[in-house]
Amino acid sequence: MKKGIKIFITSLILMMTLSIENIYAAGFSVSRSTSSVSPGGRFTVSVSCQGAGQFSVSASNGSVSSSSLWVDGSGSVTVTAGSSGTVTVSVSAIDVTGYDESSITGSRSVSVSINTPTSSNNSNSSQTNSSSSSSNTTNNNTTTTNETNNQTTQQQEETKKSNNNNLSSLTLSTGTLNPEFNSNQTNYEVNVDAKMTEITIDAKALDSKASITGTGKHSLQVGSNTFEIKCKAENGSVKTYTITINVDETPLVYLKHNKQKLGVVRNVKDLGIPESFEATTIKIDDQDVTAYHNNNMNKTILYLVNEKGEKNFYLYDEKEGVTSIFTPVTLLGRNVYIIDVNKDDVKVSNTKYNKIQIDNNTLNGWTFKDNKNYSLIMVMNAQGEKVIYQYEATENTLQLYHQVKQKQPKQQKNIMTYVFAATTVVFALISLVLIRYFYIHKKH
Protein backbone atom coordinates (compact mmCIF):
# COMPACT_ATOMS: atom_id res chain seq x y z
CA MET A 1 0.00 0.00 0.00
CA LYS A 2 2.75 2.46 0.99
CA LYS A 3 4.65 1.62 -2.17
CA GLY A 4 1.54 2.50 -4.23
CA ILE A 5 1.20 5.86 -2.47
CA LYS A 6 4.85 6.71 -3.22
CA ILE A 7 4.35 5.84 -6.89
CA PHE A 8 1.21 8.03 -7.00
CA ILE A 9 2.95 11.04 -5.42
CA THR A 10 5.95 10.68 -7.76
CA SER A 11 3.65 10.55 -10.79
CA LEU A 12 1.70 13.59 -9.56
CA ILE A 13 4.91 15.67 -9.17
CA LEU A 14 6.04 14.61 -12.66
CA MET A 15 2.70 15.65 -14.19
CA MET A 16 2.80 19.04 -12.43
CA THR A 17 6.33 19.63 -13.71
CA LEU A 18 5.31 18.82 -17.30
CA SER A 19 2.28 21.15 -17.11
CA ILE A 20 4.29 24.25 -16.25
CA GLU A 21 3.85 26.70 -19.14
CA ASN A 22 6.98 28.76 -18.59
CA ILE A 23 10.00 27.35 -20.34
CA TYR A 24 13.27 28.65 -18.90
CA ALA A 25 16.73 28.53 -20.34
CA ALA A 26 20.02 30.02 -19.51
CA GLY A 27 19.96 33.79 -20.14
CA PHE A 28 16.29 34.26 -21.03
CA SER A 29 12.92 32.51 -20.77
CA VAL A 30 9.82 32.29 -22.97
CA SER A 31 6.25 31.76 -21.75
CA ARG A 32 2.79 31.50 -23.30
CA SER A 33 -0.53 32.83 -22.00
CA THR A 34 -2.44 29.58 -22.76
CA SER A 35 -1.81 25.98 -23.78
CA SER A 36 -4.66 25.80 -26.31
CA VAL A 37 -6.55 28.15 -28.55
CA SER A 38 -9.39 28.05 -31.08
CA PRO A 39 -8.67 28.33 -34.84
CA GLY A 40 -7.61 31.89 -35.65
CA GLY A 41 -7.48 32.70 -31.97
CA ARG A 42 -4.83 34.87 -30.37
CA PHE A 43 -2.52 34.44 -27.42
CA THR A 44 0.52 36.17 -25.94
CA VAL A 45 4.12 35.00 -25.87
CA SER A 46 6.32 36.77 -23.28
CA VAL A 47 10.12 36.98 -23.14
CA SER A 48 12.00 37.65 -19.89
CA CYS A 49 15.72 38.14 -19.31
CA GLN A 50 18.16 39.73 -16.92
CA GLY A 51 19.30 42.20 -19.55
CA ALA A 52 18.24 44.15 -22.63
CA GLY A 53 18.44 43.69 -26.39
CA GLN A 54 16.80 42.62 -29.65
CA PHE A 55 15.03 39.27 -30.17
CA SER A 56 13.65 37.81 -33.40
CA VAL A 57 10.22 36.13 -33.21
CA SER A 58 8.65 33.72 -35.73
CA ALA A 59 5.70 31.33 -35.75
CA SER A 60 4.86 28.17 -37.67
CA ASN A 61 1.17 27.55 -38.40
CA GLY A 62 0.45 31.09 -37.20
CA SER A 63 1.59 34.71 -37.37
CA VAL A 64 3.20 37.15 -34.92
CA SER A 65 2.41 40.84 -34.40
CA SER A 66 6.12 41.71 -34.73
CA SER A 67 9.05 39.75 -36.08
CA SER A 68 11.44 41.77 -33.89
CA LEU A 69 11.05 42.44 -30.18
CA TRP A 70 13.07 44.82 -28.00
CA VAL A 71 13.27 43.53 -24.43
CA ASP A 72 14.54 45.40 -21.39
CA GLY A 73 13.82 42.90 -18.65
CA SER A 74 10.62 41.72 -20.33
CA GLY A 75 8.54 42.06 -23.49
CA SER A 76 5.74 40.31 -25.36
CA VAL A 77 4.18 39.76 -28.79
CA THR A 78 0.71 38.67 -29.91
CA VAL A 79 0.38 35.44 -31.88
CA THR A 80 -2.54 34.47 -34.13
CA ALA A 81 -3.07 30.72 -34.52
CA GLY A 82 -3.75 28.86 -37.76
CA SER A 83 -6.85 26.81 -38.56
CA SER A 84 -5.82 23.50 -37.02
CA GLY A 85 -2.96 21.51 -35.52
CA THR A 86 -0.32 23.19 -33.34
CA VAL A 87 1.25 26.64 -33.56
CA THR A 88 4.91 26.86 -32.52
CA VAL A 89 6.57 30.19 -31.66
CA SER A 90 10.38 30.47 -31.80
CA VAL A 91 12.35 33.26 -30.09
CA SER A 92 16.08 33.89 -30.78
CA ALA A 93 18.45 36.36 -29.14
CA ILE A 94 19.95 38.66 -31.82
CA ASP A 95 21.83 41.32 -29.88
CA VAL A 96 21.20 40.96 -26.17
CA THR A 97 23.45 41.97 -23.28
CA GLY A 98 22.87 41.00 -19.68
CA TYR A 99 22.80 43.50 -16.86
CA ASP A 100 26.12 41.98 -15.79
CA GLU A 101 27.45 42.87 -19.31
CA SER A 102 27.53 39.20 -20.34
CA SER A 103 26.27 38.19 -23.77
CA ILE A 104 22.90 36.39 -23.92
CA THR A 105 22.42 34.00 -26.86
CA GLY A 106 20.30 31.03 -27.89
CA SER A 107 16.81 30.19 -29.12
CA ARG A 108 13.68 29.10 -27.27
CA SER A 109 10.23 27.96 -28.44
CA VAL A 110 6.75 27.26 -27.09
CA SER A 111 3.81 25.41 -28.63
CA VAL A 112 0.06 25.89 -28.34
CA SER A 113 -2.50 23.37 -29.60
CA ILE A 114 -5.37 24.48 -31.84
CA ASN A 115 -8.72 22.99 -30.79
CA THR A 116 -10.92 22.19 -33.79
CA PRO A 117 -14.65 22.23 -32.88
CA THR A 118 -16.50 18.90 -33.57
CA SER A 119 -20.06 18.59 -34.86
CA SER A 120 -22.64 16.04 -33.51
CA ASN A 121 -26.12 14.87 -34.46
CA ASN A 122 -27.54 16.19 -31.21
CA SER A 123 -26.18 19.66 -31.79
CA ASN A 124 -27.50 19.62 -35.37
CA SER A 125 -30.96 18.49 -34.21
CA SER A 126 -30.96 21.16 -31.55
CA GLN A 127 -30.03 23.85 -34.06
CA THR A 128 -32.76 22.60 -36.46
CA ASN A 129 -35.43 22.72 -33.74
CA SER A 130 -34.28 26.13 -32.69
CA SER A 131 -34.46 27.39 -36.29
CA SER A 132 -38.01 26.11 -36.80
CA SER A 133 -39.25 27.68 -33.59
CA SER A 134 -38.48 31.26 -34.59
CA SER A 135 -37.28 32.45 -37.98
CA ASN A 136 -36.88 36.05 -36.73
CA THR A 137 -34.61 34.98 -33.91
CA THR A 138 -32.50 32.96 -36.36
CA ASN A 139 -32.08 35.94 -38.68
CA ASN A 140 -31.07 38.20 -35.83
CA ASN A 141 -28.55 35.64 -34.55
CA THR A 142 -27.13 35.19 -38.05
CA THR A 143 -26.66 38.95 -38.48
CA THR A 144 -24.94 39.25 -35.10
CA THR A 145 -22.69 36.30 -35.91
CA ASN A 146 -21.67 37.80 -39.25
CA GLU A 147 -20.85 41.15 -37.62
CA THR A 148 -18.76 39.39 -34.98
CA ASN A 149 -16.91 37.39 -37.64
CA ASN A 150 -16.20 40.55 -39.64
CA GLN A 151 -14.83 42.30 -36.59
CA THR A 152 -12.69 39.28 -35.76
CA THR A 153 -11.34 39.11 -39.31
CA GLN A 154 -10.54 42.86 -39.27
CA GLN A 155 -8.76 42.54 -35.93
CA GLN A 156 -6.76 39.61 -37.24
CA GLU A 157 -5.70 41.60 -40.33
CA GLU A 158 -4.60 44.55 -38.16
CA THR A 159 -2.76 42.20 -35.84
CA LYS A 160 -0.81 40.78 -38.75
CA LYS A 161 0.67 44.24 -39.60
CA SER A 162 4.11 44.77 -38.10
CA ASN A 163 4.62 47.47 -35.46
CA ASN A 164 8.41 47.37 -35.75
CA ASN A 165 9.59 50.97 -36.26
CA ASN A 166 13.23 50.48 -35.19
CA LEU A 167 16.29 51.32 -37.25
CA SER A 168 18.97 48.70 -37.74
CA SER A 169 21.65 51.28 -38.67
CA LEU A 170 22.24 55.05 -38.79
CA THR A 171 25.37 56.38 -40.52
CA LEU A 172 26.86 59.73 -41.61
CA SER A 173 29.23 60.67 -44.43
CA THR A 174 31.48 62.35 -41.83
CA GLY A 175 31.61 62.62 -38.05
CA THR A 176 30.85 60.12 -35.27
CA LEU A 177 27.53 59.58 -33.51
CA ASN A 178 27.55 60.25 -29.78
CA PRO A 179 26.49 57.96 -28.16
CA GLU A 180 27.09 54.96 -30.42
CA PHE A 181 24.07 53.83 -32.43
CA ASN A 182 21.47 51.71 -30.67
CA SER A 183 18.01 51.10 -32.12
CA ASN A 184 16.46 52.11 -28.80
CA GLN A 185 18.50 55.36 -28.58
CA THR A 186 16.73 58.22 -30.39
CA ASN A 187 18.95 61.28 -29.72
CA TYR A 188 22.49 61.75 -31.04
CA GLU A 189 25.08 64.54 -31.32
CA VAL A 190 27.87 64.96 -33.89
CA ASN A 191 30.74 67.49 -34.06
CA VAL A 192 32.25 68.31 -37.47
CA ASP A 193 35.00 70.55 -38.86
CA ALA A 194 34.49 74.30 -39.42
CA LYS A 195 34.74 73.93 -43.22
CA MET A 196 31.91 71.37 -43.54
CA THR A 197 29.00 72.75 -45.58
CA GLU A 198 26.96 69.57 -46.17
CA ILE A 199 26.51 66.04 -44.84
CA THR A 200 24.81 62.83 -46.01
CA ILE A 201 22.67 60.78 -43.61
CA ASP A 202 21.82 57.13 -44.30
CA ALA A 203 19.59 54.76 -42.32
CA LYS A 204 18.12 51.26 -42.64
CA ALA A 205 15.01 49.80 -40.99
CA LEU A 206 15.10 46.64 -38.93
CA ASP A 207 11.83 45.51 -40.57
CA SER A 208 11.74 45.38 -44.37
CA LYS A 209 8.09 46.53 -44.31
CA ALA A 210 8.95 49.81 -42.54
CA SER A 211 9.64 53.07 -44.40
CA ILE A 212 12.21 55.80 -43.63
CA THR A 213 12.18 59.58 -44.22
CA GLY A 214 14.75 62.29 -43.51
CA THR A 215 17.83 60.64 -45.03
CA GLY A 216 19.98 61.97 -47.88
CA LYS A 217 22.16 65.06 -48.36
CA HIS A 218 21.68 68.05 -46.06
CA SER A 219 23.31 71.49 -46.07
CA LEU A 220 25.05 72.67 -42.89
CA GLN A 221 25.21 76.08 -41.28
CA VAL A 222 27.82 77.20 -38.77
CA GLY A 223 26.75 76.20 -35.27
CA SER A 224 23.93 73.80 -34.39
CA ASN A 225 21.99 71.87 -37.09
CA THR A 226 19.13 69.50 -36.15
CA PHE A 227 17.78 66.73 -38.41
CA GLU A 228 15.00 64.16 -37.80
CA ILE A 229 15.03 60.63 -39.24
CA LYS A 230 11.62 58.95 -39.00
CA CYS A 231 10.96 55.21 -39.24
CA LYS A 232 7.32 54.28 -39.94
CA ALA A 233 6.19 50.73 -39.19
CA GLU A 234 3.75 48.76 -41.36
CA ASN A 235 0.92 49.50 -38.91
CA GLY A 236 1.62 53.26 -39.07
CA SER A 237 3.48 53.76 -35.79
CA VAL A 238 6.45 56.15 -36.09
CA LYS A 239 9.72 56.44 -34.19
CA THR A 240 11.80 59.64 -34.60
CA TYR A 241 15.59 59.66 -34.36
CA THR A 242 17.08 63.16 -33.82
CA ILE A 243 20.64 64.09 -34.85
CA THR A 244 22.19 67.42 -33.77
CA ILE A 245 25.25 68.29 -35.88
CA ASN A 246 27.52 71.01 -34.48
CA VAL A 247 29.70 72.77 -37.05
CA ASP A 248 32.83 74.29 -35.48
CA GLU A 249 32.47 78.09 -35.29
CA THR A 250 36.21 78.86 -35.50
CA PRO A 251 36.64 81.98 -37.72
CA LEU A 252 38.21 81.57 -41.15
CA VAL A 253 39.16 85.27 -41.55
CA TYR A 254 41.13 87.32 -39.00
CA LEU A 255 41.84 91.06 -38.66
CA LYS A 256 43.90 93.17 -36.24
CA HIS A 257 42.97 96.20 -34.14
CA ASN A 258 44.75 97.76 -31.16
CA LYS A 259 47.13 94.79 -31.00
CA GLN A 260 44.14 92.40 -30.82
CA LYS A 261 43.46 89.47 -33.13
CA LEU A 262 39.82 89.65 -34.20
CA GLY A 263 38.03 86.86 -36.08
CA VAL A 264 34.97 87.32 -38.30
CA VAL A 265 32.05 85.54 -36.59
CA ARG A 266 30.45 83.06 -39.00
CA ASN A 267 27.29 82.12 -37.11
CA VAL A 268 25.14 85.24 -37.46
CA LYS A 269 21.71 83.70 -38.13
CA ASP A 270 20.26 84.95 -34.81
CA LEU A 271 22.28 88.20 -34.67
CA GLY A 272 20.46 91.43 -33.88
CA ILE A 273 21.59 93.95 -36.50
CA PRO A 274 21.81 97.64 -35.43
CA GLU A 275 18.99 99.85 -36.68
CA SER A 276 19.28 101.16 -40.27
CA PHE A 277 22.08 98.69 -41.10
CA GLU A 278 21.57 96.10 -43.86
CA ALA A 279 23.46 92.86 -44.46
CA THR A 280 25.85 92.74 -47.39
CA THR A 281 28.82 90.67 -48.56
CA ILE A 282 32.37 91.97 -48.91
CA LYS A 283 35.71 90.40 -49.79
CA ILE A 284 38.48 90.12 -47.17
CA ASP A 285 41.55 88.06 -48.03
CA ASP A 286 39.67 86.63 -51.05
CA GLN A 287 36.96 85.27 -48.75
CA ASP A 288 33.28 86.26 -48.76
CA VAL A 289 32.44 87.89 -45.42
CA THR A 290 29.06 89.06 -44.09
CA ALA A 291 29.12 92.78 -43.29
CA TYR A 292 26.49 95.44 -42.49
CA HIS A 293 26.23 98.88 -44.13
CA ASN A 294 24.36 102.08 -43.23
CA ASN A 295 23.84 104.42 -46.19
CA ASN A 296 22.87 107.41 -44.02
CA MET A 297 26.04 107.16 -41.93
CA ASN A 298 28.12 105.80 -44.82
CA LYS A 299 29.60 103.30 -42.38
CA THR A 300 30.33 99.56 -42.65
CA ILE A 301 30.58 97.30 -39.62
CA LEU A 302 31.67 93.70 -38.99
CA TYR A 303 30.72 91.31 -36.18
CA LEU A 304 34.02 90.11 -34.70
CA VAL A 305 35.23 87.99 -31.78
CA ASN A 306 38.44 88.63 -29.84
CA GLU A 307 40.81 86.08 -28.32
CA LYS A 308 38.83 86.09 -25.06
CA GLY A 309 35.68 84.99 -26.92
CA GLU A 310 34.01 88.42 -26.58
CA LYS A 311 31.87 89.37 -29.59
CA ASN A 312 31.07 92.89 -30.76
CA PHE A 313 30.52 95.10 -33.79
CA TYR A 314 33.48 97.03 -35.21
CA LEU A 315 33.76 99.85 -37.75
CA TYR A 316 35.54 98.67 -40.88
CA ASP A 317 37.14 100.57 -43.76
CA GLU A 318 38.43 98.85 -46.91
CA LYS A 319 41.69 100.84 -46.80
CA GLU A 320 42.27 101.24 -43.06
CA GLY A 321 40.77 97.94 -41.89
CA VAL A 322 39.17 97.86 -38.42
CA THR A 323 39.11 101.41 -37.01
CA SER A 324 37.03 101.23 -33.83
CA ILE A 325 34.65 99.23 -31.70
CA PHE A 326 31.01 100.04 -32.50
CA THR A 327 28.53 99.23 -29.72
CA PRO A 328 24.89 100.42 -30.01
CA VAL A 329 23.64 101.69 -26.62
CA THR A 330 20.89 103.88 -25.22
CA LEU A 331 22.17 106.55 -22.83
CA LEU A 332 19.42 108.34 -20.91
CA GLY A 333 17.03 107.99 -23.87
CA ARG A 334 19.61 108.81 -26.55
CA ASN A 335 20.53 106.15 -29.14
CA VAL A 336 24.28 106.42 -29.70
CA TYR A 337 27.27 104.21 -30.47
CA ILE A 338 30.24 103.64 -28.17
CA ILE A 339 33.49 104.02 -30.13
CA ASP A 340 37.19 103.93 -29.33
CA VAL A 341 38.43 107.20 -27.79
CA ASN A 342 41.95 108.26 -26.89
CA LYS A 343 43.15 110.39 -24.01
CA ASP A 344 44.01 113.30 -26.30
CA ASP A 345 40.77 113.27 -28.33
CA VAL A 346 39.28 115.90 -25.98
CA LYS A 347 41.55 118.62 -24.61
CA VAL A 348 39.79 120.37 -21.76
CA SER A 349 41.79 121.82 -18.91
CA ASN A 350 41.32 120.59 -15.37
CA THR A 351 39.99 117.14 -16.49
CA LYS A 352 41.21 113.59 -15.92
CA TYR A 353 40.86 110.67 -18.37
CA ASN A 354 39.11 107.64 -16.73
CA LYS A 355 36.10 105.28 -16.78
CA ILE A 356 32.58 106.70 -16.55
CA GLN A 357 29.44 104.73 -15.66
CA ILE A 358 26.14 105.77 -17.31
CA ASP A 359 22.99 103.60 -17.38
CA ASN A 360 24.97 100.41 -16.61
CA ASN A 361 27.31 101.23 -19.52
CA THR A 362 31.02 101.83 -18.98
CA LEU A 363 32.66 104.42 -21.25
CA ASN A 364 36.04 106.07 -21.49
CA GLY A 365 35.78 109.80 -20.77
CA TRP A 366 37.07 112.83 -18.91
CA THR A 367 36.05 113.86 -15.37
CA PHE A 368 36.49 117.42 -14.06
CA LYS A 369 38.98 117.48 -11.21
CA ASP A 370 37.27 120.26 -9.25
CA ASN A 371 33.81 118.63 -9.49
CA LYS A 372 33.70 114.85 -10.05
CA ASN A 373 29.95 114.93 -10.67
CA TYR A 374 30.64 116.40 -14.12
CA SER A 375 32.20 114.34 -16.92
CA LEU A 376 32.64 114.43 -20.67
CA ILE A 377 32.16 111.50 -23.09
CA MET A 378 32.68 111.15 -26.84
CA VAL A 379 30.30 108.90 -28.84
CA MET A 380 28.98 108.59 -32.41
CA ASN A 381 25.47 109.74 -33.28
CA ALA A 382 23.01 108.40 -35.86
CA GLN A 383 24.56 110.61 -38.57
CA GLY A 384 27.99 109.03 -38.07
CA GLU A 385 29.41 112.14 -36.37
CA LYS A 386 31.58 112.15 -33.28
CA VAL A 387 29.90 114.28 -30.58
CA ILE A 388 30.80 115.25 -27.00
CA TYR A 389 28.24 115.04 -24.18
CA GLN A 390 28.50 116.44 -20.68
CA TYR A 391 27.19 114.08 -18.00
CA GLU A 392 26.04 115.24 -14.56
CA ALA A 393 25.92 112.33 -12.08
CA THR A 394 23.81 113.94 -9.32
CA GLU A 395 20.71 114.48 -11.46
CA ASN A 396 21.72 111.86 -14.02
CA THR A 397 21.48 114.21 -17.01
CA LEU A 398 23.20 114.30 -20.38
CA GLN A 399 23.55 117.25 -22.75
CA LEU A 400 25.68 118.31 -25.70
CA TYR A 401 28.88 120.01 -24.62
CA HIS A 402 30.19 123.22 -26.25
CA GLN A 403 33.65 124.38 -25.27
CA VAL A 404 33.87 128.22 -25.03
CA LYS A 405 37.10 129.62 -26.49
CA GLN A 406 38.22 133.17 -25.57
CA LYS A 407 39.08 134.23 -29.10
CA GLN A 408 37.70 136.96 -31.35
CA PRO A 409 35.70 135.91 -34.37
CA LYS A 410 37.62 135.97 -37.62
CA GLN A 411 35.36 138.66 -39.13
CA GLN A 412 35.79 140.98 -36.16
CA LYS A 413 39.55 140.40 -36.27
CA ASN A 414 39.66 141.48 -39.94
CA ILE A 415 37.69 144.70 -39.26
CA MET A 416 40.06 145.68 -36.47
CA THR A 417 42.98 145.13 -38.82
CA TYR A 418 41.48 147.42 -41.43
CA VAL A 419 40.72 150.13 -38.82
CA PHE A 420 44.27 149.96 -37.50
CA ALA A 421 45.70 150.24 -41.01
CA ALA A 422 43.46 153.21 -41.87
CA THR A 423 44.35 154.96 -38.63
CA THR A 424 48.00 154.46 -39.30
CA VAL A 425 47.68 155.98 -42.79
CA VAL A 426 45.75 159.03 -41.49
CA PHE A 427 48.27 159.54 -38.70
CA ALA A 428 51.10 159.37 -41.23
CA LEU A 429 49.44 161.99 -43.51
CA ILE A 430 48.79 164.36 -40.61
CA SER A 431 52.38 163.97 -39.51
CA LEU A 432 53.64 164.87 -42.99
CA VAL A 433 51.41 167.95 -43.14
CA LEU A 434 52.56 169.17 -39.73
CA ILE A 435 56.20 168.59 -40.56
CA ARG A 436 55.85 170.58 -43.79
CA TYR A 437 54.01 173.35 -41.99
CA PHE A 438 56.66 173.74 -39.31
CA TYR A 439 59.37 173.56 -41.93
CA ILE A 440 57.88 176.46 -44.00
CA HIS A 441 57.08 178.50 -40.86
CA LYS A 442 60.62 178.14 -39.64
CA LYS A 443 62.04 179.21 -42.99
CA HIS A 444 59.99 182.39 -43.04
Image: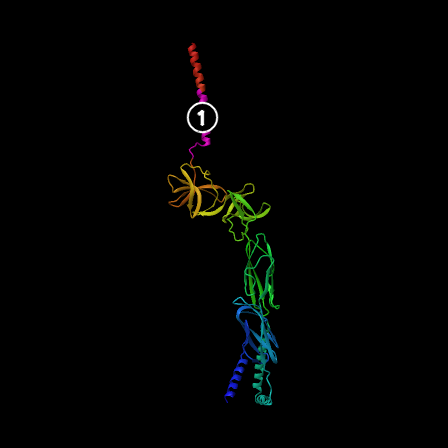
Q: Is residue 426 magenta?
A: yes
Q: Amino acid at mark 1?
A: Val
Q: Does residue 428 show up?
A: yes
Pointer 1: residues within 10 angstroms few (<14), some, or many (20+)?
few
15 or 207, nearer to the observer: 15
Q: Does residue 298 show up?
A: no
Give the x, y percent position of residue 55. 57, 70
Give the x, y percent position of residue 360. 43, 48
Residue matched to label 1:
419
Give the x, y percent position of residue 60. 61, 76
Q: Is residue 422 left or right of residue 199?
A: left
Q: Quadrant of the C terminus?
A: top left
Instruction: Identify the residue at image location x=42%, y=46%.
Output: 357
Specify the segment rendered in magenta. Answer: 405-427
Q: Is residue 95 left or right of residue 332?
A: right
Give the SS element for disc 1. helix
Q: Is residue 377 left or right of residue 320?
A: left
Q: Is residue 248 above or below residue 241?
A: above
Quadrant in which residue 206 is drawn: bottom right
214 or 204, nearer to the observer: 204
